[in-house]
Image (spheres, rainbow, N blue to C red):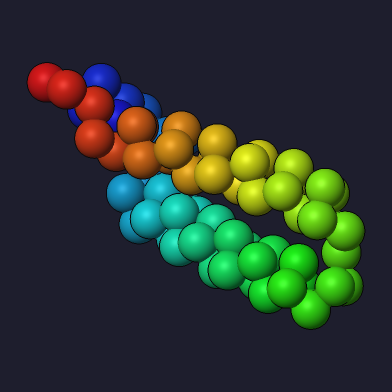
């Protein structure tokens, strides 16, 4: 994000952090749904992988090497 700091349309650090916190909550809720049997293990694991990928992408944006 350092290269985007002047871009008014770029997300703020707070928006990015809020998104990462939301993804963490989604991950935890998905684990609970799998454990309760609300969702199949196969579909649940696929969802967990997608959430984790999104989280890692956001984390990489925040912690880019300088």
In the displayed structure image, the side of residue 29 where residue 18 appears, left or right? left
Note whether residue 15 is visible.
Answer: no
Q: Position of residue 8 (x, y in %)?
A: 39, 35
Residue drawn at 17 percent across, 22 percent down: 65
Q: Specify the quadrant that holds the N terminus.
A: top left
Residue drawn at 44 percent across, 38 percent down: 56
Residue 41: which quarter of the image?
bottom right
In the displayed structure image, the side of residue 4 where residue 56 appears, left or right? right
Residue drawn at 35 percent across, 32 percent down: 61
Q: Position of residue 6 (x, y in %)?
A: 27, 29
Note whether residue 40 is visible.
Answer: yes
Is residue 66 placed above or below 11 in the rendered structure? above
Residue 18: which quarter of the image?
bottom left
Q: Position of residue 2 (x, y in %)?
A: 22, 28
Is residue 26 placed above or below 5 in the rendered structure? below
Q: Position of residue 11 (x, y in %)?
A: 43, 42
Is residue 40 placed above or below 57 in the rendered structure? below
In this view of the protein, which residue sits in the foreground, 2 or 20? Answer: 20
Residue drawn at 46 percent across, 33 percent down: 57
In the displayed structure image, the side of residue 13 where residue 26 appears, left or right? right
In this view of the protein, which residue sits in the foreground, 19 or 23? Answer: 23
In this view of the protein, which residue sits in the foreground, 13 or 54? Answer: 54
């Amino acid at each position: 994000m350092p290269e985007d700091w002047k871009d008014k349309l770029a997300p703020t650090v707070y928006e990015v952090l809020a998104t990462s916190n939301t993804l963490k909550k989604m991950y935890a809720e998905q684990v609970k749904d799998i454990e309760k049997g609300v969702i199949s293990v196969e579909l649940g694991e696929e969802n967990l992988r997608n959430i984790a990928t999104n989280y890692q992408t956001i984390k990489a944006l925040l912690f880019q090497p300088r």
